[in-house]
């Protein structure tokens, strides 16, 4: 697993965990808020009922000593279902289904709207509201106090809330999981071109290191010989010629690599302009015409190029043709012909050279690949020309195709992208 995949996976897992934690937190808070709202609602209702009960009790009797049964009567009349009243530990009335205990009750005057506790009794979740009050007769010493209760069974709310919580957590889980997968997909999609470029550059560097090793070793060997051994003039000249020849080749290799590496960079931008094909052919002819004549070959323009124009980067396309023609020169014999041509959407170079075996056609586009390695080294071919041309075609958003037959020649075609 490479670094990009590790980053994508780590980011996705982190996002998934954070999303899950946030979702669970929100769900839990929502659950708690439901309980809190119910507690406040029932508490307010209980407090208002007690106020009404006390008001009616004070209206309904003028006896300074109110009996407990009278208090119970008014309590039953005005309190909601599920309420209970105790005098000390004695139960006077209980309309709930549960026996309540006043032991371990903690009364607070600051409780709003009243004192409250949550208990689980016989598998039921109960919200129990309670309030303490002195007996409603003044100036009489008393040892016991009234305790008012209101019981709300919220078992169904707990169950439904639990199911809702589980459902919401599952939804959050799958939503987070989906987000994680989407993030992995997007990161892979975004980084895939960079990954391909990185791999291509890595291969280029590896191949270049291999290419540099042999000539550098030889150059070093010859230089050490020149420094430490007495040679004849002929031998010295031979060694110096070899060093000069290989140094020049390494210089060309460096220039080609710089040009090719720039084309692989993501920020590589090309200047597309309307270019006359005849003007392009003239520039190419001026660059390679002399060399073709020296080799005893003929250079021919063909196709429908008259008054033809294309949107191209002129410098890059000139380089495209020069590289292909140099390959054709190395593959052709004296007296043969090299053609450049164009039609509506294509540009090409073709020759009458040795050709490329069909199984090698796709391989020759790779940097530093040579069909005939011994002949290529002698001719100075570095195996970068077609790789450079392929990348030039790519940055033009076009494509490059190779048509070849052994013994009959090769044709390399650039097809421009159709708008």
Image (cartoon, helix red, strand yellow):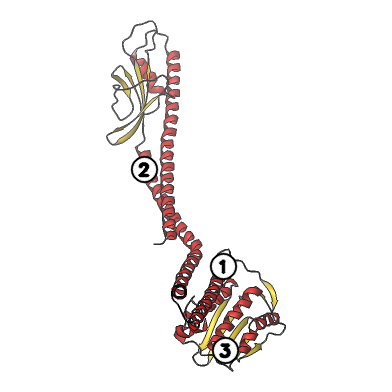
* Quadrant that contains the C terminus: bottom right
Image: 294 above or below 111:
below
Inter-mark Cα distance, 3 to 1: 29 Å
For marks 3 and 2 on the same chain, the one whose residue lies earlier in the sequence: 2
Which of the two residues, 39 or 273, is positioned nearer the viewer here?
273
- The residue where tag 1 is placed is 262
For marks 1 and 2 on the same chain, the one whose residue lies earlier in the sequence: 2
Residue 149: x %, y % from top left: 36, 24
Residue 251: x %, y % from top left: 55, 73
Residue 261: x %, y % from top left: 54, 68
The answer, for residue 203, to whether it is visible in the render is yes
Secondary structure state at the residue bearing disc 1:
helix
The image quarter containing residue 410 is: bottom right
Q: Residue visible at 47% across and 82% down?
A: 232
Secondary structure state at the residue bearing disc 2:
helix
Q: Nearer the viewer, mark 3 or mark 2?
A: 3
Secondary structure state at the residue bearing disc 3:
strand
Q: Residues within 10 Å of mark 2 (few under 14, many from 20)?
A: some
Which of the two residues, 260 or 253, is positioned nearer the viewer here?
253
- The residue where tag 3 is placed is 351
The image quarter containing residue 265 is: bottom right
């Amino acid at each position: 697993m490479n670094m990009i995949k590790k980053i994508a996976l780590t980011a996705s897992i982190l996002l998934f965990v954070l999303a899950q934690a946030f979702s669970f937190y929100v769900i839990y808070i929502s659950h708690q808020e439901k309980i809190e709202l119910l507690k406040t609602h029932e508490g307010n209702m209980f407090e208002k009922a007690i106020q009404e009960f006390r008001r009616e009790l004070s209206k309904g009797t003028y006896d300074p000593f109110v009996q407990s049964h009278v208090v119970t009567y008014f309590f039953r009349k005005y309190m909601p279902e599920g309420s209970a009243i105790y005098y000390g530990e004695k139960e006077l009335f209980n309309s709930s289904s549960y026996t309540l205990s006043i032991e371990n009750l903690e009364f607070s005057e600051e409780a709003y709207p009243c004192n409250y506790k949550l208990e689980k009794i016989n598998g039921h979740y109960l919200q129990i509201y309670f309030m303490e009050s002195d007996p409603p007769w003044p100036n009489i010493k008393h040892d016991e106090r009234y305790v008012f209760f209101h019981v709300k069974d919220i078992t169904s709310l707990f169950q439904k809330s639990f199911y809702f919580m589980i459902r919401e957590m599952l939804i959050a889980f799958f939503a987070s999981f989906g987000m994680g997968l989407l993030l992995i997909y997007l990161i892979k999609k975004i980084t895939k071109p960079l990954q391909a470029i990185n791999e291509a550059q890595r291969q280029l560097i590896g191949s270049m290191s291999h290419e540099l090793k042999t000539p550098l070793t030889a150059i070093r060997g010859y230089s050490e010989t020149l420094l430490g051994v007495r040679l004849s003039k002929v031998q010295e000249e031979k060694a110096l010629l070899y060093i000069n020849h290989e140094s020049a080749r390494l210089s060309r290799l460096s220039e080609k690599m710089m040009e090719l590496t720039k084309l692989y960079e993501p920020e590589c931008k090309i200047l597309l302009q309307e270019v006359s094909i005849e003007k392009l052919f003239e520039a190419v002819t001026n660059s390679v015409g002399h060399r073709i004549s020296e080799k005893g070959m003929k250079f021919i323009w063909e196709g429908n190029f008259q008054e033809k124009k294309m949107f191209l980067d002129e410098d890059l396309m000139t380089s495209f043709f020069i590289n292909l023609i140099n390959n054709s020169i190395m593959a052709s014999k004296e007296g043969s012909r090299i053609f450049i041509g164009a039609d509506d959407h294509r540009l090409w170079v073709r020759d009458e050279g040795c050709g490329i075996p069909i199984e090698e056609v796709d391989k020759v586009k790779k940097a530093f690949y040579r069909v005939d390695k011994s002949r290529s080294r002698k001719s100075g071919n570095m195996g970068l020309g077609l790789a450079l041309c392929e990348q030039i075609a790519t940055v033009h958003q076009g494509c490059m195709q190779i048509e070849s037959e052994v013994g009959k020649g090769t044709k390399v075609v650039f097809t421009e992208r159709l708008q």
